[in-house]
Image (spheres, rainbow, N blue to C red):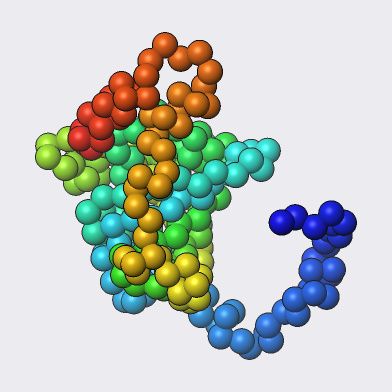
Amino acid sequence: MVATAQRYITSAEELRGVIPAPKADSLVFQKQIPRLDAHCRAFIEKSPFVLLATASADGRCDVTPRGDGPGFVQIADDTTLYLPDRPGNRRLDSMLNIVDNPHAGLLFLVPGVDETLRVNGVARLTTAPDLLASMAVKGKKPLVAIELQVEEVFFHCARAFRRAKLWEPDTWIERSELPSLGQIIVDQIKGLEVTAADLDCSLAESNRNLY
C-alpha cells in the first residue's frame, strides 16, 4: 500500500542522510575492478543469461534479456566483450540506444548461483564478418554484435536472490496462475481481429525458431 503523504528525496546529501555511505576502504568499493580477472571470466563462461541495460540520449532507460548457451558472450580480452544479437522482435531498443548513448551495463546470471556479476562500460555495434561467423549457431550468424569495452566490474552479493528464493523450485508458481502472452496482448490492444489462442500458436511457432 502506498503512503498517502509522500516525502521525496531530491539530493545525494538527503539520501546519504537516510542511508550513510560505506567507509571509503570498505570491500563494497574495493571489490570493483577495471578489468575482467579469472573469476569474472569463469562466471561469464558459465552464464547463459544476461540483462543488458541501456539509455537513450535523453535518459530514457531500457533493460532487455539476452540468452543463449553458457558462454555465449565472447571474451576477447580483459576489457572487451561481444554479445551476439539473436533474432527477436526487431524493435532494436537497446541497439538504438547504444547508437545515441554508448554507456551500458550487463548483469550476468548463472542458474542456481545466487551471486551475480555486474559489468559496466561503453558499447558499440559491429558487423565484423569474422566475429559474426564465430557466433553462428546451427549455421546461422547474427546480423550484428554488441561490443562492450569494460570500465568496471564487480560481483554482487546473494541477498536479493536469497530473499526472492529465485532458484528454489518449491517457490515457483504454476504457469496457469498468469494468463498467456496471447491473452495479455488481446486484453491490452483493443480491437484486434485475432484470438488469444491464435496469437499463442503464432508465438509458440516463433519461439521454436531461435536462430
Give the residue drawn at x 50%, y 47%: 63
Give the residue drawn at x 54%, y 38%: 97
From the viewer's perspective, is residue 150 above or below residue 26? Answer: above
Question: Quadrant where the N terminus lies?
Answer: bottom right
153 left or right of 73? Answer: right
From the viewer's perspective, is residue 4 above or below residue 89? Answer: below
Give the residue drawn at x 80%, y 57%: 3
Q: Position of residue 133 (x, y in %)?
A: 19, 41
The reply to whether residue 70 is in sight is yes
Residue at far left of view: 138
Q: Position of residue 16 (x, y in %)?
A: 79, 74
Q: Position of residue 201 (x, y in %)?
A: 26, 26
- Between 132 and 91, the one lying in front of the other is 91
Question: Quadrant where the C terminus lies?
Answer: top left
Task: Give residue 113's quadrant in the image.
Answer: bottom left
The reply to whether residue 153 is in sight is no
Task: Give residue 91's quadrant in the image.
Answer: top left
Please state the total of marks drawn on the protein image. Answer: 0
From the viewer's perspective, is residue 144 above or below residue 74? Answer: above
161 left or right of 138? Answer: right
